[in-house]
Image: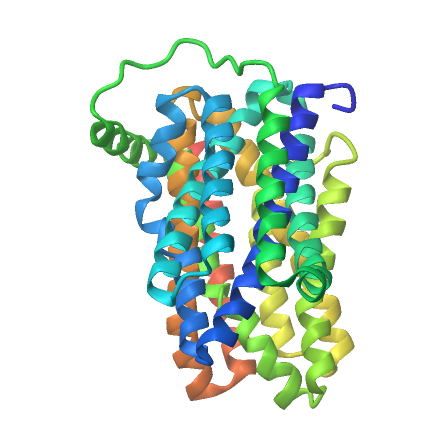
Amino acid sequence: MRTNQPFQRLWAARTISYFGDSLSLVTLMLYVAQSTGQASAVAMLLLVGDFAPALVSPLTGTVSDRFDLKRVMVGCELAQAGLVAVIALWLPALPLLLLLVGLRSVVAQIFQPASRAAVPQLVRADDLPAANAAVGFGTNVGETVGPLAAAVAIPLLGIRGALLVDVATFLVSATVLGVMPQIQRGQRAVLTSFLGDARAGLAYMWRSRIVRTITLGYIGVVAFNGIDDVALVFLATDALDGGESAVGLLLAAVGLGLIVGYALLGRGKTRMSMVALLLTGLATVSAGNLLTGLAWAVIAAFTLQALRGIGIAALDVAANTMLQQTVPAEVLGRVFGTLYGAIGLAAGFSYVAGGVLLDLTGPRVTLVVAGTGGLLVTLATALALRRRR
């Protein structure tokens, strides 16, 4: 893939785009906190940005399947540049800001499945695992560096200046995508209405046992384990008496594990089958939280969370690769759009239900319950995949 220029351009464009996303998120959180002084307003900003697009994910994925992938991705980046530019120059009051952020998030939700659906059209089938690992690595690095860049840009350039940096990243990404060759996907299916195509995508996902199993397994593990970021805060400060520095250490562990996991999987062809990698990822994500709930010291919890990060990377690579190898190109955008939207909804459910459990029982019990539930989902997924053979 080192000589595959179309894929390298896609990788670079995605990395730049996600870097800008994370930079602007931190900037907007600070702006809302300063302008309103209300934590609830910041929570509303995150809710609009993270979960609102998930509600229309079958529709956003449909865009990728109805139109040329390259044009969809370039159009998404230009649209996001325009929306963020309006926010930067206007800095509107909260209601209008939330509307603009929601629109930008929906456009980003279109870009994500389109860019994932493009990967199997740009690389050979046996290079898909390494390609997906490279995409995940770039995305994670962009999302990690973005907040650090915001910490530098905001004092130097102010809120408007930092947001205009995000505008520039979208324009650069669109330019990089614009010089890619057209992405050929073969014969497209006969199109019906837009809503008809969306319904057809959902019906395909339910009829296909392998797609249904991957989707339900993924969202099931997220639904149980999504609360872990919140639980880790209380585990570090209360159960382990580690203080604020321990919180940062535990939350950074997963990011470190993600980078290591993607780097290892991107080095070459993995000897493990994608089914085995998927189940290993599901199990590691869940067992890591279960054992973290039993950890006796911060260093033990840090190690377990870093291993969880490697498991998340394995899960991400395996799920994406299996879908790209299984799903016909003409419906792949809808599958990815619905999958990632469902994951967002599962995370939202986990925050609500897990938050109640956390208040009632504490962080250790919450993490043990989360991990145990995830392992049960992993077992059910393994049995369903075994029946498929």
Closer-to-camera residue (171/189): 171
The residue shown at (38%, 66%) is: 94
Pick out the residue farthest to the top: 187
- Which colour assignment does the render follow? rainbow
39 with respect to 53 (left or right): right
Residue 3 coordinates in the image, percent (x, y): 77, 19
Residue 82 coordinates in the image, percent (x, y): 47, 41
Q: Is residue 258 above or below residue 113?
A: below
Q: Is residue 290 above or below residue 85?
A: below
The residue shown at (46%, 71%) is: 42
Q: Is residue 372 above or below residue 135?
A: below
Query: Is residue 149 shown to the viewer in this render?
Result: yes
Number of marks present in the image shown: 0
Query: Is residue 386 shown to the viewer in this render?
Result: no
269 with respect to 161 (left or right): right
The residue shown at (54%, 14%) is: 182
Q: Which image quadrant for residue 350?
A: bottom left
Residue 284 coordinates in the image, percent (x, y): 62, 57
342 with respect to 172 (left or right): left
Q: Which image quadrant for residue 10?
A: top right
**What quarter of the picture does the N terminus occupy?**
top right
The residue shown at (24%, 28%) is: 194
Closer-to-camera residue (361/255): 255
Residue 296 coordinates in the image, percent (x, y): 71, 83
